[in-house]
Amino acid sequence: MSGNVVMVSGIDTGIGKTWATGMVAGVLHRGGCRVMTLKLAQTGCSGIADDIREHRKLMGLPLLPLDLNGLSCPYVFPYPASPHLAAQLAGRQIDPVVLDRAADQLAAAFDMLFVEGAGGLMVPLRRELLFIDYLAARGYPLLLVTSSRLGSINHTLLSLEACANRGIELKAMFYNRFQEEERLIGDDSRAVIAEAACRYGYDVPVIDLPAGGQEGAERFGREVRALALCTSLRVHQQETRTDKT
């Protein structure tokens, strides 16, 4: 296991994983961290993965050679379905060794690597291999994306229980308020989720994904930097504090 790799997953598909991955990577990139993103598998497209394109846009970067040669997303399948089925229909099968090789190569080349999963935590990469078990076997810490939409409390608590049962380290949760219809419900759901996380042993920050506006983006940046995910930034900040004393 590489110590500079963090997984990003969500309580469901379409929950905001790609947005969260790109936004977090962008904050660290602009702060001086040599950061990269990896998408394990993308379905419903061909060529360069749509999610990788979105990552680079949010990071303020063009497509890179490692995107053009497929290293940043080892598996892309045209059929829009769960990775195991999309792979099967393409006459292929997702090989964990290939995923590990891509993650190891990128982790060795950059200070920090964020790996975005496909779908929710329990999605099958192969019929006999769930994403959450792939994650647990490698010991990577997790950033979990949840939301204020109907059903999120149930889905989030099930996800937290599944993580706790497998001994997965949770670094933070990101709360997606996009298309939130009523603030009262959103605020209550957020509080319930945070309290439940503590009961599962996860006393972690719950960070709102910025929906727009400078104030929200600045707050998000501060909260992400406070997670101290990037070792090179932690060293730089420590050296800066030492120089001032």
Image: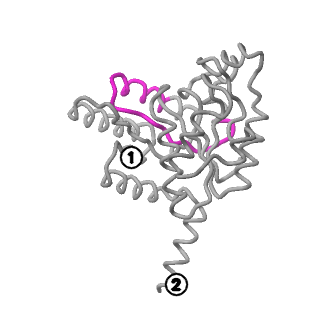
Q: Nearer the viewer, residue 14 or 154?
A: 14
Q: Is residue 151 magenta?
A: yes
Q: Position of residue 187 (x, y in %)?
A: 26, 37
Distance between the Cα atoms at labels 1 and 2?
31 Å
Instruction: Give the amino acid type for the residue marked by disc 1 in the picture.
Output: Ile
Q: Furthest-top residue in view?
A: 89
The colour scheme used to paint the residues is: one colour
Cβ atoms under marks 1 and 2 closer than 8 Å? no
User: Badge 2 is on which residue?
Assistant: 243
Q: Which residues are magenta?
A: 136-161
Q: Quadrant of residue 148?
A: top left
Question: Measuring 47% from the left and 27% from the top, which residue is drawn there?
Answer: 14
Instruction: Give the amino acid type for the residue marked by disc 2 in the picture.
Output: Asp
Q: Secondary structure at mark 2?
A: helix
Q: Is residue 189 above or below residue 227?
A: above
Q: Position of residue 61 (x, y in %)?
A: 57, 52
Q: Furthest-bottom residue in view?
A: 245
